[in-house]
Image (spheres, rainbow, N blue to C red):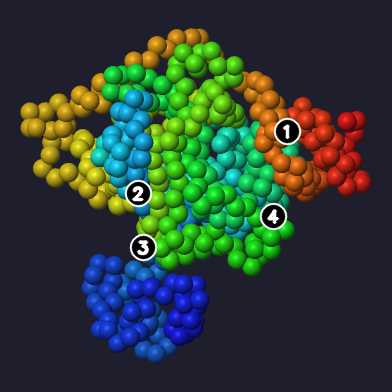
Amino acid sequence: VAAWQFRVFARLKNWDHQPRLQGLWGKPRESITTSWGVPIPEKDASLTVGYHGQVLFQDWVLIDELAHFSRERIPERVVHAKGAGAFGYFEVTHDITQYTAARVFSEIGKKTPIAVRFSQVAGEMGYSDTVRDVRGFAVKFYTEDGIWDLVGNNLPTFFIKDSALFPTFIHILKRNPKTHIRPDYDMFWDFISLRPESTHTTLMMFSDRGIPDSYRHMHGYGVNTFAFVNSHGKFSYCKFHYLSNQGIANLSSEEAQRIAGADPEYLLRDLYNAIETSEYPSWNLYVQIMTPEQAAKNPYDPFDDSKVWLHADFPLIPVGRLVLNKNPKSYFAEVEQIGFDVAHLIPGIEPSPDRMLQGRLFNYGDTHRYRLGINNTQLPVNSPFRVNNYQRDGRSTIQSQPGAPNYHPNSFKGPENDRRARALTPVLPIQGDAQRIDNGNEDNFSQPRLLYQNVLKPDEQGRLIENIISWLKNANSVIQDRALLNFSKVDEDLARRIRQGLPLGSQPHIDL
Ligand code: HEM
């Protein structure tokens, strides 16, 4: 693309600020160098023996260039591969110190820098932004007590509630291993209908919220149950909600399909341009609190992430505001290399026995060690304000803690255990028999029924049904039957209307 063409393109896309265009206006340009900083005499010609001669092995400029190029890609995230990132701050607006001693919440008005990554779940890096899917909404808080990662989604619940099911659940959203086609409707509906705990989140995914019109116009939810500890050591369970101040906006399936072809980067572009033109999006952060006594008596499992905590019983308590006001300078360095880890919790915030959360506590750090390397927390975007420990070395070490002892205990003023963190570590009374119990069959239909009958308006119910039909009509009739049976347990009318919409020839056998 000629330079002027690129400039016109940049202006159209509102990317006029690209610093690498500055050279076009007569500013002196710096010399190109190799990756080890040596000036290059001729970038665009390899070192050959004569005009038609072979390229010399001593052409290290070329070898450096080609070798770097063939290593430009790192493994993409196994889920949530496509995403957009931005930076900003979190500001405390309400006092919740009665629940948690986490310093990020210590006083009203306190601001903490944050990084956010929004994402699609199922597709690969080049996938279109407007395909029906759950969206990720992960927040990294750079707190004075280290990194806290709140890795949430735009729906308040999840399809499954035991991490043992996660890899195969993800397989049904990905490509068929034989045909390489996705979505594979048989795979999808087979699993969904065999695991009825997925019904609640499936209804949400096929509702209008399955295709947000922008990342700015969707809510976020921590989904899993966490716990708080206050400065007196009092322990309570909590869930996080971050509600959009822009309101909710979604795309119809038809419009989403058109945009998928016309502008596959629709959500990415929207976020980037909004921030670039100073329309800074924000979300209000809320928590729900459940005491251990309430948890023991609660009629449904408070650690089951396929269910919400009913707001009537556990109201939203306001906490603060998340604001995004800065775009990344380098997508790769700051968005592709950002690593959110559910196990990155700070004193005052603890995990709960939520089985999905327990699996997630392991999996994110593990995937970062694979995707980004053992020193991934030393990358600038992942790095806390300070690290004092006895870990050293490993591939791509950036920070070496020079001069400090590398063993513990020691007599040389190396870092010691933190008393405050110790005081905030809860003593948990845990007992029971170790066993494998499938928790998939615990009242999977009351909450989807509430959603369908009490939350969705008639027009929203209609679109939900249309959207389900558009996928279910492609599945095998035995699988359709099973899916309909589950929907009939949510609401007879829902199942009947879905069945009526299935085209002739794929009519299922059961009588509703
Ligand atoms: C990303 C595993 C459940 C939200 C990921 C990644 C893995 C993973 C391996 C890729 C991370 C990377 O390469 O950086 C799991 C497992 C789960 C689980 C094992 C269940 C046992 C969930 C749930 C949510 C969620 C319930 C929503 C609350 C996300 C988000 C990302 C992500 C938002 C993208 C983070 C980013 O933007 O980099 N997950 N996940 N996951 N997961 Fe999960």
Query: Disc 3 vs disc 4: which is toward the camera?
Result: 4
Dividing the picture into quadrants, the one containing residue 87 is bottom left
How far across and how far down the image is residue 502, in percent? 85, 44
Question: Which of these two is toward me, 243 or 349?
Answer: 243
Cβ of mark 2 under 8 Å from ligand 1: the answer is no
Label 2 CA crowd tier, 10 Å (few <14, some 14–19, many 20+): many
> At 51% from the left edge and 25% from the top edge, which residue is drawn?
314
How far across and how far down the image is residue 379, in percent? 31, 50
Question: Is there CB contact under 8 Å for labels 2 and 1?
Answer: no
Q: CA distance from mark 1 to mark 3?
A: 46 Å
Query: Is residue 218 visible in this depiction of the protein?
Result: yes
Task: Give the mark nearer the N terminus: 2 vs 1.
Answer: 2
Residue 266 in the figure: left or right of residue 326 = right
Q: CA distance from mark 2 to mark 4?
A: 32 Å
Question: Is there CB contact under 8 Å for labels 3 and 4?
Answer: no
Label 3 CA crowd tier, 10 Å (few <14, some 14–19, many 20+): few
Question: Is there CB contact under 8 Å for labels 4 and 1?
Answer: no
> At 73% from the left edge and 39% from the top edge, which residue is drawn?
189
Residue 267 in the figure: left or right of residue 322 = right
Q: CA distance from mark 3 to mark 2?
A: 17 Å
Question: Which of these two is toward me, 355 or 85?
Answer: 85
Which disc, if any, is residue 453? Answer: 1
Task: Give the mark nearer the N terminus: 3 vs 2.
Answer: 2
Which disc, if any, is residue 89? Answer: 2
Task: Give the mark nearer the N terminus: 4 vs 1.
Answer: 4
Please name the residue that numbered disc 4 is placed on: 252
Q: Is residue 344 above or below residue 23?
A: above
